[in-house]
Image: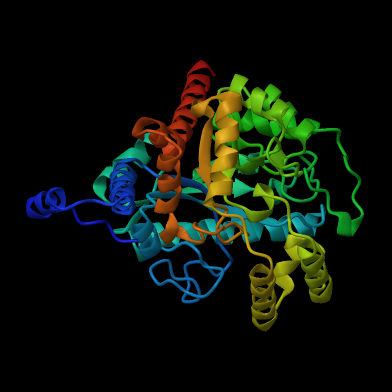
Amino acid sequence: MMPLKKLSSCTLVFALMISITPQTASAETSAELVERARGIHERVITIDTHVDIPPNFATDAYDPMKPGPRGQQVHIPTMIEGGLDATFIIVFVGQGPRTTSGYGRALADAFIKFAAIHKVTTDMYPDQIELALTADDVRRIDASGKKVALIGIENGYPMGQDLRLLDQFYDYGARYFGIVHNGHNDLGDSAVPNRRLGEPAAEHGGLSDLGRQVVKRLNELGIMVDISHSAEQTALDIIETSAAPVIASHSGVDGILNHPRNLSDAELMALKENNGVVQVVAFDTYLRAVPAGKQDAIDALWSDMGLKSFADFRNLSKDDLKVYDAKMAEIDLEYPRAGVKDLVDHIDYAIDKIGLQHVGIASDFNGGGGIEGWSDAADTFNVTLELVKRGYDEDEIALMWGGNLLRVMEDVETYAIRHRSEN
């Protein structure tokens, strides 16, 4: 959507001279609301805390300046079009075997993604996008007119059992760290055990002893700890263990939809007490109940493709991936996704429960996220528009779109600086 042109003085005078029907008045009111929302959207810093990338990111297959095929939802041009200022680009490796070879392969896959992000910000398009390492960096880069890249890690699996790797991740720019993904790992229990592998509901009873050491070291380094994908007890253990505020980088709320990936009221209240923030995510199946048959269709597709975990996607050929994407597109067409209103329903609930200072926004683009009205970065303004329609003012929207996240980031940085000065 392009910015609306302001009415000229002659147009306004003419409008006052003619009789206005209720329909016309309503249309003018809607136009004014859109214009006001557009102004707010342009002034606030908009931060999306979860955008996945594939292994071919920063290649001809996924050039961040050249919007490509389905599955590529975020590019610099679409960020510009949608007014999305900053994104946490995610170093994600799916849960795999907890063996020496499994850890080694996962770590190599993680560093490929680290390298790709640095390639984009340092070699390919440094005049368009810059890597931020601090909250102040985010503000400085945004003020310069460039887009902001930050790095988050999803799933602690690539570190295996080696705490020293956390220091390496920090040096490479990671500023949040998700303890688990789908399937349990050495650090804690997942909200979604791998049922295809027959995993039990819980393995550690929450956060493992190693997981507690990880949380402590993340605090010391100045990396935000992410509870998204954690089982409820794991999340509560993380919050109890952390000496600094934590985040849920991309989650829904259980009070709207009972889903393993959504935060319970107990988790929300603990997050509030911790002074953290939940980034409510635009993920179809976390926002409203899955239509009958959709999950069955997805399960059948995974079975047909021989997929048991997200780690198996790396074994698919390019042709197999195209088949998968095409069939998922057919499923999405048959079962329409949730929309922006559903997303803001979750935001409203979280705010009512724990206060506006603890709520933010995320997409999970390229990782299954995307809803009607916010299907890629170019649609980002539509979220702000719905927030304005709900009655939120500019200061409140600024907190949701980035202010709350930056406050947590600064608190984590401050704790790390204090720790270093005392040790």
Q: How many marks?
A: 0
Between 167 and 75, the one nearer to me in the picture: 75
Depth order, front residue of 266/384: 384
Q: Is residue 86 above or below residue 326?
A: above
Residue 223 falls in image quadrant: top right
Residue 123 spot, x, y in % from top left: 37, 63
**Which quadrant: the C terminus?**
top right
Q: Residue 104: give x, y in percent of width and height.
A: 72, 57
Residue 36 occupies quadrant = top left
Seen at 47% across and 61% down, the residue is 74
Q: Quadrant of the N terminus?
A: bottom left
Viewer-nearest residue: 98 or 308: 308
Q: Residue furthest top?
A: 422
Residue at the (12%, 50%) spot, across then down: 17
- Can residue 176 be seen here? no
**At 49% from the left edge and 58% from the top edge, which residue is drawn?**
373
Q: Quick check: can you spot residue 33?
A: yes
Please say if 178 is above or below 1: above
Q: How is the image coloured?
A: rainbow
Q: Locate residue 209, reporting x and y percent.
A: 79, 30
The reply, left or right, for residue 423 in relation to residue 214 is left
Q: Is residue 63 above or below residue 141?
A: below
Residue 171 position in % (x across, y down): 50, 43
Give the residue at the far bottom of this rendering: 319
Comparing 387 with 326, the one in front is 387
Asked whether, in this view, residue 409 is left or right of residue 43, the answer is right
Looking at this view, name the residue that lies furthest to the left. Answer: 10
- Answer with left or right where residue 170 lies relative to residue 213: left
